[in-house]
Image: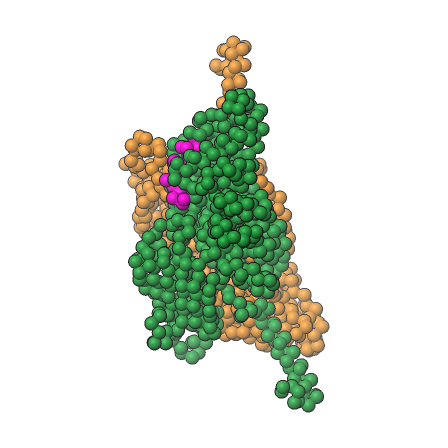
Chain colours: A orange, B green
Amino acid sequence: MLLFSLKPHCKLIFLVLLLWVSLLVDSNSGVELDESLTYIWPLPSEFTSGNQTLTVDPALSLFVSGKGGYSNILKEGFERYKKIIFKHASGISLFQKLRGIRSVYDISELRIIVNSDSEELQLGVDESYALFVAKNDGKSIIGEATIEANTVYGALRGLETFSQMCAFDYETKSVQIYKAPWYIKDNPRFAFRGLMLDTSRHYFPIDVIKQIIESMSYAKLNVLHWHIIDEESFPLEVPSYPKLWNGAYTKWERYTVEDASEIVSFAKMRGIHVMAEVDVPGHAESWGAGYPDVWPSSSCREPLDVSKNFTFELISGILSDIRKIFPFELFHLGGDEVHTDCWTSTPHIKQWLNDHNMTAKDAYQYFVLKAQEIAVSKDWTPVNWEETFNSFPSKLNPRTVVHNWLGPGVCPKAVAKGFKCIFSNQGVWYLDHLDVPWNQVYSAEPLEGINNVSEQNLVLGGEVCMWGETVDASNVQQTIWPRAAAAAERLWSKREAVSVRNITSTILPRYHYFRCLLNRRGVQAAPATNFYARQPPTGAGSCYEQ
Amino acid sequence: MLLFSLKPHCKLIFLVLLLWVSLLVDSNSGVELDESLTYIWPLPSEFTSGNQTLTVDPALSLFVSGKGGYSNILKEGFERYKKIIFKHASGISLFQKLRGIRSVYDISELRIIVNSDSEELQLGVDESYALFVAKNDGKSIIGEATIEANTVYGALRGLETFSQMCAFDYETKSVQIYKAPWYIKDNPRFAFRGLMLDTSRHYFPIDVIKQIIESMSYAKLNVLHWHIIDEESFPLEVPSYPKLWNGAYTKWERYTVEDASEIVSFAKMRGIHVMAEVDVPGHAESWGAGYPDVWPSSSCREPLDVSKNFTFELISGILSDIRKIFPFELFHLGGDEVHTDCWTSTPHIKQWLNDHNMTAKDAYQYFVLKAQEIAVSKDWTPVNWEETFNSFPSKLNPRTVVHNWLGPGVCPKAVAKGFKCIFSNQGVWYLDHLDVPWNQVYSAEPLEGINNVSEQNLVLGGEVCMWGETVDASNVQQTIWPRAAAAAERLWSKREAVSVRNITSTILPRYHYFRCLLNRRGVQAAPATNFYARQPPTGAGSCYEQ
């Protein structure tokens, strides 16, 4: 309005002035956040926010209540998040110095109410929480910052969200919560939000596995699918068959029973299940390093010899031993990529097939079902890669969880037959496929093609898979992140929130922000939008644009 | 001998048997250590070892003596290394269980004697130590494991060496020391063993900088050369000129004074100096985001305006402020790649040059010397990239440390003129040159071409440089390691030990081992021998061969 009331030459001067000012602003900082977006990843299912900025006391104290409030899981979780939130030494800012201001904080206590004292971590455990953050006006009965959850695991999710609200402000040198008051009610869309790690192609030291688990908790992923052994190496100790880990690459690239238990307990402290996999019969050549009897012959080493009782004794022994390590109710039996040539070409197995009137395909089914029986007898729910379902769906144990990988459309078929299903379509959710851009990872929908609600309920969730041929301790986090986060939001947040149209303007800035958050927490998340995953940045620049 | 006394057909059976046994052994594990080598990196200057294997008590206790024994640096160091050494939950092995063995350990105490109580960390601080590890036979006056050092920093180096001797044995599930008894006397060849980090091209969060510092201590590197600011961004807070960090990429990609102090103190706890750099006048465009007056003009922004007093006031202000953060006696003033076109093309500077009867080259010298004066007035020893020495050696402050980078042969010239020198020949020690293989990094010799001992003494050491154009938090450790370790051994160990002929058989297995040690400690060291640095592994396999 002002502009139009000016005389023409004044208008010109005014416009030049405007241009000059905007150039000046530009030269300061190229990246500004779109404040209309919510920088919490994954996006909570319900929330409202305001426009106040609150300060958080570096001496933030924890006040617990409820039957589960005194859990050690909660206490240690709070201490972890406190370190994350107050990473920067709080200094007195120049601003405060000049004004002689002594800080008074808006938030100096976090109340956490946990209703249940059960720490049992099973599939579908209640991860819901409510989080309220508001300035205490003296009238409200709600404390300054409150998390309420039914279980400690819900409380951990709430702590993660709270930590993401807290940002260090470099001007005031204090931790601030933007856009308060916050009212959040949150729970995951899927109970199973997984990441698969392959420790057979490359061994990952336990410190590295812990780093991965820790970072999973930042994205609210909750299942580490541990593909422990495969044809290349057998790193795990199995006390009943102590020569099995002779199949490790070296005597240092191994996991003791205690190491594995330590990993399970480290994960549990973060509300993360560990689903172990013993992939039979196809991916098991390394077993023969210790027990060559399971090879069809010394020159033809896979699949495991279907004709020998010893093969199943060994499987049973392994499962008995590791059942003590892995309390999670799901156990992965593999069953993928079984090429039966060694069975049909090895005389004693060929003979056995003839004697039992079996084709190689029959023998594959026989093997898988026998392995399922063993797993079920140990009180495990068996998970199999989709080939078993594709080959003999009607024979599978009805409790079988079908793990999709080959392509789209498998979960719809599996749930139509009453099976539970995990979505990992390799075209979008195999992290070793480096050419899948983040938006394709993000847009993949586990429920696609499933319209019936009762069938939808059979989809447990999904999992991104980090196969290990070209990842080792040097680059695994860089290959996992940030694309695993794209899947994590798909699996946690409401379908309508993640299925918006223009994800470049609505999701990408949040995705950049979360990638930089991972970096700030010491996680080696790679540039978000490079053509190939884990590519280095192409030149100098801000994290928030790369 | 046995073989030749056998009958012919027995010989054949025997040979087949031998072949079969060796095949069996092969199938267990492909990688065996050459036990004649010493797997401590960098190699100590003097050592003897034996052939005993000793066990180490997971409850290892520290017994200190000497004036410096009660240092907090020592105490915290011991706690850090204890976590590293006893990373694996100590289990009772099956072997022990079967035999009902309750462990008794050979080493249950580490004695550390520190003679001086000074914690001053200056260039050339005494880092020597002696380390003895032997089974206590009841007669010896030496304890089971003893480190003796003149300073806490020497003791820290001894702790690192001790930690590398300790290996977790997966069979007995205990930490063992191989090849005992050990008698080590060790000290570094060079006082300055550096790594340069560039936080201007990409911002590194403080957690990531701490990870880098921590990993430096594993290779006994002792100087973090912090190239804080450059033309791309100005991340550091300067209280006297609070608009300078407007030149940061974003408001979150910054270091407060407290952050920087925290980094310096974190480094000191590990015996690592932090040498700050403020690179003038060439690499300073980002200063103008806050103070555009230092640009020659808004369209021609580098080098800093030589004609204005304000430019030097600003430099003086920055140096005064950061002097309080960085106690190290060396301070890097840059001085490289100064292209003076903006000076000769900007009218007011051209006029100033005329008025002062200066060429652009004269003005470059004028600028550098004036900056040196400011640094010296703050009680700093100035370091400059070699261009200043190449351009006007006789004018430089005689205390100047010449920092070589352009190519070989510069340190010989600098020390011949009485200057101190740091070796960083870009052809071998620029880590952003991804095509330099490990053996070329390893073979680079800072004293090459310098035969006179008094001139050799002027070479402070060397530094590998990690320029930041294509590294960020996702891949910086992977690009630094393991090649930085090759330089680290060159800088620490005796020249004759690192200048052996066939490094493929004598050094490479140790280099592989150290890379895997870094991985075990959670450091993302890349495969050791890939053609390009930081390349992913090319396929499945053991860390010890990749």
Residue B294 at x, y percent in the picture: 48, 28
**Viewer-proximal residue among A42 and A6:** A6
The correct choice, above or below, for B370 with respect to B93 in the image is: above
| Residue name at image x 29 percent, y 32 percent | A100
Residue A153 at x, y percent in the picture: 41, 53
Q: Is residue B59 left or right of residue A204?
A: left
Q: Is residue B523 left or right of residue B105?
A: right
Specify the principal SS of the magenta part: helix
| Residue name at image x 55 percent, y 31 percent | B361
| Residue name at image x 70 percent, y 77 percent | A347
Q: Quadrant of residue B505?
A: bottom right
Can residue A459 be seen in the rendering of this structure? Answer: no
Residue B2 at x, y percent in the picture: 62, 87
Q: Is residue A179 left or right of residue A65?
A: right
**Viewer-proximal residue among A71 and B522:** B522
| Residue name at image x 40 percent, y 78 percent | B100
Quarter holding the C terminus of chain A?
top right
- Is residue A148 within the magenta segment? no
Question: Which residues lie in the magenta part?
Answer: B314-329
